Each structure stands twice: as C-alpha cells, then as structure tokens.
C-alpha cells in the first residue's frame, strides 16, 4: 500500500527542496499539537515546531537518495521533535529564571469558544503532567496526535508492547485523576 | 458511551492547527525562501535578494519590471521587505559605492564548480578596468574554455556586484550582456571608461600597451597602463609582439601567463 507519506518520502529522495514544503504542511499540525503538551506555552510550542522542521531539513541534506527512501518519515520527525522538547525542558530546569513566563497556553483567544478550548487544553496539560514521561509521550502521540503504536515505538526507541502498556497505564492514570477531581 | 471512550475522544479534541507563520519561518531558516528589496544601484534602482548564506540575486528594476515579475522569475520563493538586514546592508553599500565585492557574502551554493571559479575570478577585476573572456579562462587554468566562460558569466546571478560587465570580447568589442549591451556600456561609462574609444582602439589593432621606460606591457585599461605618458607609450597587437620586443607582462593585470 502506498500512502501519502510514502509518496512524500519518495519525492523528498529525488527533489528535497521541492518536496520539503509539503513535508512541513503535512506534518506541522500533528507536531504542533503534540509539542503543545510537552512545552510551557504556545510560543514555545511554535518555536519547537519550527526548529524541528529546520533540523529535519538539515538532516535530510546529509542523507543520500536511498537513505531518504528508507526513512520512516513521521517517527523520524517525532524523534527530532521529542529531543527538542526534552532539551528545552532541561534548559528551563537549569535556568529557572527563564521559566518565569506566563504559563497560559495562548494569550490571543478572541472568542468564548476559543477561550473554552484553551481552558480545556490547560486542564489536560496539567493532568498529563501528572503521568510519567513515557506514559505522557505514549498517550499524547497516540491519542492526541494519532500516531500508531509502531510509529511511537520507532520514534522513542522503546518496544511496541511497552509503548502500548505505557499508553494503557497513562489512560488509567488520567481516569483516576478525573475521578478524584469530581468527588 | 463509556468513560474510557470519553477520555480518548477528549484527548483527540486537543489537536490544534499549527500557527500560520511556521512554514514561512522554516523556509527562511532553511534558506529555501529569500527576502528581497529595492536599493539604489550604480545605474538606477535594482532588486536585491538574499538568504542566510548571502546575496542570491541582483537585477536592475528596468530589466525585469514589477515586483510580481521579479518574484516569478526568481528561482525560489521571495518575500519583499523594506530594507536588507544589517549584516548585509553595510557591505552592500560598500560594494555599490566602490565597485568592489569586498566582504559582501554571495550565495553561490547552488552553482557548479566551474561557474563559481569564473565568478570568483571575475570579482577580482577592479572597477574601471576590463579583461577579455580568454583572460578568465587562462587564469582559472582552463585556457580553452573561453566560450564556457562567456556562458558562465551570462548566468551570473548577481551582475553588477560580481562585475561581469568588465569582461569583454577578445577582439576588443564590448560584447553581450544579460541585460543588453547598452546597460553594459553605461556601467562601464559609470566607472570612467569610454566604450567607444576602447572599441576604436581595438579596431586599430591595439590590444596591449607598454612603457618603454619599464619594459612592461599591460591591458590598456590596467591602472598601470593608464599612468604611461604619451611619450613613453608603446602599442602592441598581441602578446607575441610584446614579447618579441622584449617586454614582460604586468604582474597586476597579467596579460600573459
């Protein structure tokens, strides 16, 4: 079966510069949605999303045609994105003064609907922060971003069965939190 | 609906569209998209484009027309901005003012090795001087490639900044220019040369001049040749004629290997 991503990978192999903008538009919403759960705020998520694609482009420059063809595009991009999220979190821990920014996810909410969606995002982010790192990664990548477990395993370097149980435990943890929130 | 499904559905609802500027920023940071503006060139306004590596295009506005025309013929996406960034502005002013490339970065990354050598050699020609195509071919160690030099210069992405207008035909005629011969002539006039006189001289068979006090011969526009007084000026048809008269080539303009 040839998926859109396979076709994109093949185009990247023969015409990196020409196909690259399509890679960004195809994957940017997924990357941004996931990264939003792993960073402090919307600005950070935007920065990490941009930086992810810049690194993807640079890495592609060092690969020959065959190596690009063999790439599992989405998991590969997520490996890069997760690394950047981790690095950023580490920097913030080491330099706490840089963490003194407004923690709201989005300042530019125009409508009541957007404000509600934003509030929802904050609530879930707090809950997700209560999970272990691997659980949070598995839950966000599978349930928010929509990545299959095989691809999550590929991008984190953990096994598929571990990833499945991480996600299952993560969901159980979230359920417990919700029950405790509403006694 | 079970609570289990509810959590999954609610998680799936946390997806968001990426902010609008992501693609543009990524394209600029990867140098896949350029910025451009209009500046005053030596002979009128010109479009100048750049990316993170340096200048990518220089085109007199009269040669292309509107911004839309420029954008459509530019090889990459290009967005208009009001001024060049500080890192380029100073060098750009200096190059336009002095006619020398200096430290202005030019992005030649998508250009082949031969063309890069031709363009780099060309940028060594000082303002107010001209050299034949064959000079570049010889200087880059490929004396037979005169035609290829012409082609490489014709595809110069940054004319004026890399002064391909200072390269002329071996027979002494001013020759072709990507933006037309009149522009080549006016660029040379702007640098204090007289294209009519240069061509007339060549028609009379004068391709090199020497000084009988130094015994050195030059291209007629070499800064050293311009200092020779009429009383000591000797004219030659060719390098062989000069060598036969026991003259040696100038080390600045290098009219012979």
Image: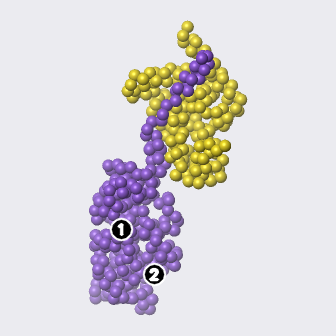
Chain colours: A yellow, B purple
In this rendering, is residue B115 above or below A66?
Answer: below
Q: Secondary structure at mark 2?
A: loop
Quadrant hosting residue A75: top right
Query: What residue did someone put label 1 on?
Result: B179
Which numbered marker is on residue B7? none
Q: Residue at x 28, y 88 (%)?
A: B231
Asked if residue A3 lies left or right of residue B155, the reply is right
Q: Locate residue B72: give its quadrant.
A: bottom left
Residue at the image position 34 percent from the left and 73 percent from the top: B181
Which mark is first along the chain, 2 or 1?
A: 1
Camera sees residue B96: no
Element under label 1? Answer: loop
Quadrant location of residue A129?
top right
Q: As rendered, which of A74 and B89 lies closer to the eye?
A: A74
Residue at image x 44%, y 91%? B244
Mark 1 and 2 residues: CB-CB less than 8 Å, in contact?
no
The spot of residue B14 in percent (x, y) is 52, 27
Q: Residue at x 58, y 50 (%)?
A: A11
The percent position of residue A150, horizontal first and vertical second, equals 67, 35
> Residue at label 2?
B256
Q: Quadrant of the N terminus of chain B?
A: top right
**Residue most extreme to the top:** A183
Q: Determine whether A176 is above or below B173 in the image.
A: above
Residue B17 at what x, y percent from top left?
48, 34
In the rendered picture of this protein, how many numbered marks are placed on residues?
2
């Amino acid at each position: 079966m040839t998926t859109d991503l396979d076709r994109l990978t093949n185009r990247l192999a023969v015409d990196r510069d020409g196909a690259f903008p399509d890679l960004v538009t195809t994957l940017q919403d997924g990357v941004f949605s996931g990264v939003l759960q792993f960073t402090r705020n919307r600005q950070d998520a935007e920065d990490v999303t941009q930086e992810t694609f810049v690194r993807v482009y640079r890495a592609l420059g060092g690969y020959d045609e065959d190596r690009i063809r063999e790439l599992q595009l989405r998991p590969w991009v997520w490996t890069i994105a997760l690394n950047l999220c981790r690095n950023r979190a580490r920097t913030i821990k080491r330099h706490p003064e840089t963490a003194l920014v407004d923690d709201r996810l989005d300042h530019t909410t125009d409508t009541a609907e957007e404000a509600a969606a934003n509030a929802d995002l904050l609530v879930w982010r707090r809950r997700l922060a209560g999970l272990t790192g691997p659980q949070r990664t598995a839950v966000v990548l599978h349930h928010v971003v929509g990545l299959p477990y095989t691809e999550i395993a590929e991008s984190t370097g953990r096994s598929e069965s571990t990833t499945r149980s991480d996600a299952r435990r993560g969901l159980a943890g979230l359920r417990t939190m919700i029950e405790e929130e509403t006694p | 609906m079970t609570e289990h499904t509810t959590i999954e559905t609610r998680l799936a609802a946390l997806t968001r569209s990426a902010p609008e500027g992501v693609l543009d920023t990524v394209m600029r940071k990867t140098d896949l998209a350029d910025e451009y503006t209009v500046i005053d060139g030596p002979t009128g306004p010109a479009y100048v484009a750049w990316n993170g590596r340096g200048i990518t295009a220089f085109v007199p506005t009269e040669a292309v027309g509107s911004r839309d025309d420029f954008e459509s013929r530019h090889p990459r996406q290009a967005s208009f901005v009001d001024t060049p960034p500080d890192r380029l502005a100073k060098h750009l002013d200096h190059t336009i003012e002095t006619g020398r490339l200096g430290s202005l970065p030019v992005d030649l990354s998508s250009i082949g090795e031969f063309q890069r050598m031709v363009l780099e050699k060309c940028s060594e020609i000082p303002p107010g001087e001209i050299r034949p195509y064959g000079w570049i071919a010889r200087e880059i160690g490929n004396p037979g490639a005169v035609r290829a030099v012409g082609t490489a210069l014709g595809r110069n992405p940054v004319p004026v900044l890399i002064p391909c207008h200072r390269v002329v035909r071996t027979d002494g005629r001013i020759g072709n220019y990507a933006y037309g011969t009149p522009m080549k002539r006016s660029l040379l006039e702007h640098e204090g040369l007289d294209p009519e006189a240069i061509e007339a001289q060549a028609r009379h068979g004068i391709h090199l001049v020497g000084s009988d006090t130094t015994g050195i011969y030059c291209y007629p526009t070499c800064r050293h040749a311009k200092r020779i007084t009429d009383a000591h000026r000797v004219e030659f048809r060719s390098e062989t004629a000069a060598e036969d008269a026991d003259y040696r080539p100038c080390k600045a303009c290098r009219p012979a290997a």
